[in-house]
Amino acid sequence: MIKELFIYVSLLAVALCSCSENDGPDAPGTLPPPVVDENTGINVSVVSKFKRFSQGEMFDGTASTVWSDTVWQNDRAYGHIALWTLRDDVSGISFEAEALKNYENEIPVENICLRSVAKVAGDPIPSVDAQPLPRPEAVYVGDALVEDLPSKLTAHELSDIWVTINVPESCPAGLYTGNIYVKQNDAIAATVAVRILVADHCLPKPSDWKFYLDLWQFPFQISALLENEGTSLAPFSDDHFRILESFYGILADAGQKSITTYIKDGAFNVGQTMVDWSRAADGSWQFDYSKFDSFVEFMMNLGITKQINCMSLAGWNNFVGYSDLSDGKYKYLNLTIGSEEYEKIWSEFLSSFRSHLMAKGWFDIAVLYFDEIIDEDMAKIVKLIRKNGADWKIGVSGKYYSVAVERELFNYSVILGNVPTSTSMTIPMFYTSCSQMHPNNYITPENSPAEMTWMAWHALASGYKGYQRWAFDYWQKQDPFDARDRANTAGDFSMIYRSGNTTQARAVSSIRFELLRDGIQDYEKARILGLNKFSSVLSMFKDTQAVDAQSKVMAAQALIKQVSVQ
């Protein structure tokens, strides 16, 4: 009985102290921090997970070497550690984590991941639509999470480590303690004490999360980047899928619900189709779905099974690309939405596509999806689709659609700041684009990563079922760590990075993406605990500018931790 009472008191104390952004050395419920060997010149402190350091920026807070957090079973904790020296360069640096223990129970060391925060090329300020020309000189901001940990510290240049702790589903509730060691030449130079409270709640696995995450995939981009460097990578080959498994595996682990497929050229750009169109000399059409099938099956095997977005009867370009079987040439046929030719060709496709989806057992999860099509054209397309079946599901990302269009939508994602006229759609969502400076997933010193966690809280407060963004991996730059694609603010084209442009390329996650997932965990916890318990904080997330995103998210997460142990 005494043991159980001690555990309970410890749980409540740690839950309360772990609500702060950065627990100081005297925080209640924690042990005093170990003494740091000042002779090494190595300085260490736990810092906020919402802090991104720019190049040349140094730590300026009150140092603490205790990290406390409150989590659930089958949950993930996110920590952030800064290291720096004010002396000459310090070499021989290494790191070691130990298992977190609670009497006979433990969180294994294999569940603790340490990654280095790499600085990437970003922009000094966010902008709407496009950066001013000439484009400002790049600033370098910590965001990419690379596996290679620093082996030395450079004077007056901070290094930081991102820590994730995966709590096993079977982990008994209790207070788990352990350490992360910073070593120099294999001797302990500094110690970060870790205090993880596991509450008696279990988070469902990501595939069962209710939050509807829809980050659009661009699997052709890695092939194009390798081709630019002289390496051939056939789309949807074994080598291609081996690379994509790394990228889309972490997407599935964040609870992604939708598979992005391309049913014609020009959905977003030339050359992106998973359905090969061909036209015989008599004008009849043939459709090869082999690429489409292989990609869908691949994504489903990763655990993304809820929805297939089929892009699109109208894309950024309204042409149809096809192989002319009469002369073997690839051609483009320009079509006008609503024209007789448009309706004839797309009706023929929809008839074929329906039969194929039915045969594969996918028709019920297929959604004919559109991106920011104007209302007049969307009304014509809806009419065409309904001529070909009342059971087709339709999805749109955009704004200002008529009630007649909105009533036909299964999935409707509105641009942040707009409100649907109709409430009949099954899956109402919102999205951010290049038209917002805040909140967004931009790489600038002005954008807080807390804006990404804010997204799920805004969805919870506003009655949306999820969040959408157009680009998970639409890389244009050959440099894997230059986030300034085209004229858009850095980060607009991708959520993550890649290790290189070779067939050995691996996914490199980001602080932005990890904290988006962190917010989705919050969404699931609040939903399970009962939204009525969070009315005091939900009202803060109804604004559309994410003003003071970090302080609001911290307050909301603090309440989740308190409610979780009550």
Image: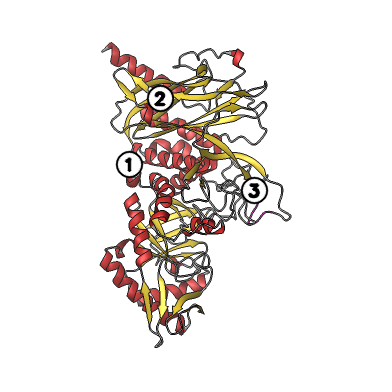
Label 1 SS: loop
Q: Earlier in the sequence, mark 2 or mark 3?
A: 3
Q: Position of residue 344 (x, y in %)?
A: 41, 82
Seen at 35% across and 36% down, the residue is 529
At label 2, the amino acid type is Ile
Seen at 62% across and 29% down, the residue is 158
View extreme (bottom): residue: 282
Res 465 visible: no
140 is within the stretch colored magenta: no
**Left or right: 117, with 392 as reference point:** right
Which quarter of the figure is the N terminus placed in? top left
At label 1, the amino acid type is Lys
Q: Does residue 44 sit above or below 525 in this rendering?
A: above
| Residue designated by label 3 | 126
The answer to whether the residues at label 2 and label 3 have Cβ atoms under 8 Å apart is no
At label 3, the amino acid type is Pro
- Residue 205 is labelled as 1
Question: Marks 2/3: CA distance?
Answer: 36 Å
| Residue designated by label 2 | 196
Q: Position of residue 63 (x, y in %)?
A: 58, 20
Residues drawn in magenta: 127-131
